[in-house]
Amino acid sequence: MSDLLSFRGVESGYGEARVLHGIDLSIGANERVAILGRNGVGKTTIVNTFHGVARLRGGEIAFNGRPARTLRHFTAAREGVSVALQGRRIIANLTVRENLLLGAAVRRPGPWNLDQVFALFPILRERAETPGIALSGGQQQMLSIGRALMANPALLVLDEPSEGLAPVIVDELAAVLLRLAANGTGLLLIEQNFSLVRRVAECYYVLSKGQIVDQGALAELSMENLKKHVAV
Ligand SMILES: Nc1ncnc2c1ncn2[C@@H]1O[C@H](COP(=O)(O)OP(=O)(O)OP(=O)(O)O)[C@@H](O)[C@H]1O
Ligand SMILES: [Mg+2]
């Protein structure tokens, strides 16, 4: 089966500045993959590159085995790749329900709809008519994930979902992500914090200064390497 998303020798950056150097990575159907790295190493630029926000200067990107230089947010969603962006990007003045409906602007056939998202995150049903700005950080993260699910992704990309969340909420998030994976959703988890990755991912890439410096099965990631590249 084709990879849901793959990068081959990707070079990209902003204006003249190069950020990513020769990135190779691939995520197959139903895989749970992590990209780990410290602040500013280029993690979000991976998302920005396939969304066409950073400029692709070399190499190839493919969605479902089909080369596509870059795809904007909604077009990527149509190809089955939905992103919960870093910082959650909840629309402050829209209600929880309205924020979720935005995620359905482009949707593929599949099981996710408002009812299913509310079943996954019951707190969002309780707060359905509340403006996004009134939610706690954890609730906003659930809303961001729920909104991405409304498109029925084959691959859900999460950019630093655990940022700013209390450990107990990170535990809840891990359980939800494992449930999604068990139902066939591929996960690409971008993190600088290992606690969520440890519970959810099966393989990893480590990014440093825009290059992949290590990769493999999560069970084989050495503590020494980990301490060098992420917060443990
Ligand atoms: N829109 C942009 N325009 C110009 N430079 C940018 C832009 N976004 C990021 N950069 C630069 O690209 C480099 C990588 O940034 P990126 O946001 O990809 O890092 P990151 O690993 O996601 O960091 P963090 O953990 O803080 O989210 C940084 O030097 C950053 O200043
Ligand atoms: Mg980032």
Image (cartoon, rainbow, N blue to C red):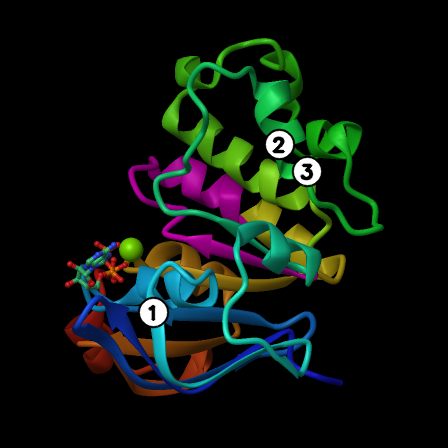
The segment highlighted magenta reads: 154-174
Q: Nearer the viewer, residue 32 or 131?
A: 131
Q: Which residue is mark 3?
A: 105
Q: Which residue is mark 2?
A: 102
Label 3 amino acid?
Ala
126 lies above or below 8: above
Q: Are marks 2 and 3 in contact (CB under 8 Å)?
A: yes
The crowding category of the residue bearing disc 3, from other C-alpha atoms within 10 Å (few below 14, some 14 to 19, many at least 20), is few
Residue 123 seen: no
Q: Nearer the viewer, residue 169 or 144?
A: 144
The crowding category of the residue bearing disc 1, from other C-alpha atoms within 10 Å (few below 14, some 14 to 19, many at least 20), is many
Q: Quadrant of the N terminus?
A: bottom right
> Tag 1 or tag 3, which sits nearer the N-term?
1
> Tag 2 or tag 1, which sits nearer the N-term?
1
Q: Is 59 on the left-hand or right-hand side of 112?
A: left
Label 2: which secondary element: helix
Q: Position of residue 83 (x, y in %)?
A: 52, 52
Residue 55 — which label? 1
Label 2 amino acid?
Leu
Q: Position of residue 199 (x, y in %)?
A: 48, 60
Label 3: which secondary element: loop
* Residue 136 found in image quarter: top left
* Residue 18 found in image quarter: bottom left
Q: CA distance from mark 2 to mark 3?
A: 5 Å
Q: Quadrant of the C terminus?
A: bottom left
Label 1: which secondary element: strand
Q: CA distance from mark 3 to mark 1?
A: 25 Å
Ligand 2 falls in quadrant: bottom left
Label 1 amino acid?
Arg
The number of callouts visible is 3
92 lies above or below 197: above
